[in-house]
Amino acid sequence: MSKTKEKKAADSEQPKMGRPSGYKPEYATQAAKLCRLGATDSDLADFFGVTTRTIQNWSSRYEEFFRALKDFKDLADERVERTLYQRAIGYEYDAVKIFNANGEPLVVPYRERVQPDTTAMIFWLKNRQPERLRDVHKHEHGGPGDFDRMSKDELRDFVTREAEALGLSSPKAETQGRSRKTGSALN
């Protein structure tokens, strides 16, 4: 037997270090059911009596547990997405009203209409089309240090364009006026 095989055989006989995981194969099925109902990792940890870190460890160590979490969390997310969409466009459902008709209950079926929800519309559209429908518009002129890479002419042109865009007087005219008074120029 080679030394490598002997070492592996000896390693497999030695007891493993650390605390046993406590994981049981049936946990995957239980986790799948809980995730289908919208459970988070924190909820799973409470259910199994472990920490969220243990849930993450089990997920990385046991493929069936990982699949249960991923697949059924995805299903729960899809359900919420469909519900948000329905809320955004409005929907109808069957309902009943119960009346008292001479001491006898009278059940009258009808169709209830839920009006579209503006907040759900906004949320849906902002997440589906973030570039078109966002609240904050970023105005980026460059990263830190970009001005250091500009020549004096490029920097002067940039400042002039920005000042004019803001409706300020041209810094070029002010700079020329100062340079005549002080005898200096921006060259």
Image: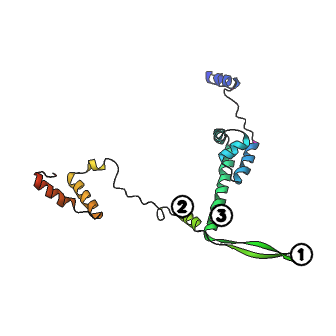
Q: Give me the disc on residue 177.
A: none
Q: Mark 3 and mark 2: span between their CA atoms?
A: 15 Å
> Label 2, label 1: how many angstroms apart (C-alpha)?
51 Å
Residue type marked 1 = Glu
Kindly identify which residue carries mark 2. 127
Q: Position of residue 113 (x, y in %)?
A: 69, 74
- For disc 3, the marked residue is 83
Q: Secondary structure at mark 3?
A: helix
181 falls in the magenta region? no
Say which residue appears at 23% left-offset and 58% top-offset.
157
Q: Residue at coordinates 74% horizontally, 51% vertically from top-left?
A: 33
Residue furthest out toward the bottom: 102
Position of residue 32 relative to residue 60, above or below, is below
Q: Amino acid at mark 3?
A: Thr
Identified at 54% across, 61% down, the residue is 127
Q: Are marks 1 and 3 in contact (CB under 8 Å)?
A: no
Query: Does residue 150 sit above or below 122 in this rendering?
Result: above
Residue 59 x/y as whole percent? 65, 42
Position of 185 relative to 164 (above/below): above
- Which residue is nearer to you in this view: 153 or 116? 116
Predominant SS of the magenta segment: loop
Residue on which disc 1 sits: 104
- Can residue 139 be seen at all in this image of the molecule? yes
Crowd tier of the residue under label 2, counting other residues whose Cα lies within 10 Å: few below 14, some 14–19, many 20 or above: few
Of the residues shown, which amino acid type is indicated by label 2?
Answer: Asn
Residue stretch in magenta:
15-25
- Please tell me whether residue 145 is drawn above or below residue 99 in the rendered image: above
Residue 156 placement: quadrant:
bottom left
